[in-house]
Image (cartoon, grey):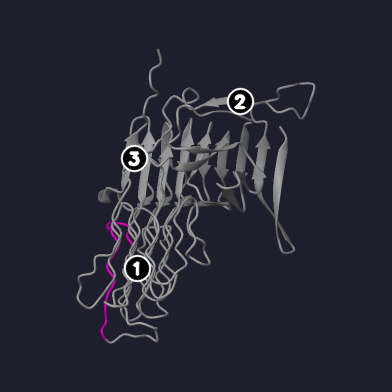
């Protein structure tokens, strides 16, 4: 078996971030030591169950690859690369009315070691179809850009770069309003987006929920509305991981698809994204999070917090006219922003706080609907945003 180690250079420091164990299924030509075996994958026959969101007509020739992530690297749904290297990949249309595209990576096995972090990026939701085992001891994320907070990843909506603009996505928050001093609304997904704060307490600009518990189609989170500046929180991304055998999220393992907080001047928080796990057996001892981001305060310097990779609630900006908290834990809805008639904070306008973003969706499908969950899942199952389901059977053929 040939080992291909991908190196990522950060300045003068050389880091080995990901190991590709190629030809996992053996050699196709014993006379050629570098010959690769190809395997025919069919969505209608390769697994004993129906893969959600992957059309039955999907058929592809793949070269089996085992991936072990032990540093930080990315999986790009625009490039089809993992850790800067090409892997079997297709960009397919789902069967929903909008024909939403999803980037599908085909692997033999996937291991995220305790030191590993796989950041899923790109314009499309991501699906990992794994023939064998998936073991997660490290971190997988599909969260907005850590530096700007306005750029979504893995299909998560990005904020429109325009002052006082409505958000983006099916659950977008609406913009702040100068005339009524109303803060921008938070985005929704499973949970509602919080309304922006204003003097009369009748703001109705938070985003409205969309999607469904089965997470079919695979959609991502939306952005809050913009306030004085174009800094609404972006939506969390969407990840689906499918294994033909089992998925194990170990105690220190984390998958985070939370939304970003609103930044500056009454912007709304982004909603959490979507996470779908499908395998005959799932053991979840770690953490799964699809939390909403907090709204920005009405002043210039009160940013909302990004959704946490835990059940901790992302707080809104804490200056006068505070932003609303994001949906998480036992409360999936984003909190409304506040209004303080004595605020101003040096801003150009006098606004209420931005609404918090709602929580996203989480789903675990197994052969019997009884995933072993001893870890932490946020939002909690009591909210209806996290559910357990049964793998669907393949359709009968004549």
The residue under label 2 is 39
Q: In which quarter of the image is residue 107?
A: top right
Secondary structure, mark 3, is: loop
Q: Residue furthest top?
A: 398
Residue 284: percent from the left, percent from the top?
Answer: 41, 44
Marks 2 and 1 sit apart, C-alpha to C-alpha, by 50 Å
Q: Which mark is residue 125?
A: none
Q: Which residue is drawn at 46% across and 24% down?
A: 44
Instruction: Tell us which disc is closer to us: 2 or 1.
Output: 1
Residue 317: percent from the left, percent from the top?
Answer: 37, 74
The answer to whether residue 334 shows anywhere in this view is: yes
322 w.r.t. 73: above or below = below
Q: Do the residues labelled 1 and 3 touch (CB within 8 Å)?
A: no
Mark 1, other Cα within 10 Å: few <14 / some 14–19 / many ≥20: many
Is 341 on the left-hand or right-hand side of 303? left
Q: What stretch is highlighted in magenta?
A: 325-341
Q: Which mark is residue 175?
A: 1
Secondary structure, mark 1, is: loop
Q: Quadrant of residue 352?
A: bottom left
Magenta stretch: residue 332 in it? yes
Magenta stretch: residue 357 in it? no
Secondary structure, mark 2, is: strand
Marks 2 and 3 sit apart, C-alpha to C-alpha, by 30 Å
Mark 3, other Cα within 10 Å: few <14 / some 14–19 / many ≥20: many
The residue under label 3 is 214
């Amino acid at each position: 078996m040939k080992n291909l180690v991908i190196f990522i250079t950060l300045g003068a420091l050389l880091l080995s971030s990901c190991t590709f164990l190629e030809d996992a299924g053996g050699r196709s030509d014993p006379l050629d030591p570098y010959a690769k075996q190809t395997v025919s994958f069919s969505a209608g026959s390769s697994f004993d169950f129906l893969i959600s969101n992957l059309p039955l007509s999907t058929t592809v020739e793949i070269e089996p690859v085992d991936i072990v992530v032990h540093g930080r690297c990315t999986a790009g749904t625009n490039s089809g690369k993992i850790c800067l290297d090409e892997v079997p990949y297709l960009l397919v249309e789902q069967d929903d009315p909008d024909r939403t595209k999803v980037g599908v990576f085909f692997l033999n096995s996937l291991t995220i070691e305790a030191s590993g972090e796989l950041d899923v990026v790109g314009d499309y939701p991501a699906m990992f179809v794994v023939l064998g085992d998936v073991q997660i001891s490290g971190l997988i994320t599909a969260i907005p850009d850590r530096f700007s907070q306005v750029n979504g990843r893995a299909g998560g909506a990005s904020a429109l770069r325009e002052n006082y603009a409505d958000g983006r996505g099916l659950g977008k928050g609406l913009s702040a309003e100068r005339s009524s001093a109303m803060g921008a609304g938070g985005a929704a997904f499973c949970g509602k987006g919080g309304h922006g704060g204003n003097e009369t307490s009748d703001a109705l600009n938070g985003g409205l929920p969309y999607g469904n518990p089965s997470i079919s189609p695979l959609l991502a989170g939306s952005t809050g509305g913009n306030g004085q500046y174009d800094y609404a929180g972006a939506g969390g991304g969407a990840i689906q991981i499918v294994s033909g055998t089992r998925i194990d999220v170990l105690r220190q393992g984390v998958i985070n698809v939370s939304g970003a907080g609103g930044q500056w001047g009454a912007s709304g928080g982004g909603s959490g994204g979507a996470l779908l796990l499908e395998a005959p057996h799932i053991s979840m001892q770690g953490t799964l999070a699809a939390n909403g981001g907090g709204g920005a305060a009405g002043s210039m310097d009160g940013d909302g917090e990004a959704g946490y990779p835990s059940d901790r609630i992302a707080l809104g900006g804490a200056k006068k006219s505070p932003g609303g908290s994001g949906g998480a834990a036992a409360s999936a809805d984003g909190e409304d922003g506040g209004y303080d008639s004595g605020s101003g904070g040096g801003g150009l306008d006098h606004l209420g706080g931005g609404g918090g973003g709602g929580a996203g969706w989480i789903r675990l499908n197994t052969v019997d609907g009884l995933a072993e969950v001893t870890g932490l899942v946020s939002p909690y199952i009591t909210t209806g945003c996290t559910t357990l389901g049964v793998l669907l059977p393949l359709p009968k053929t004549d």
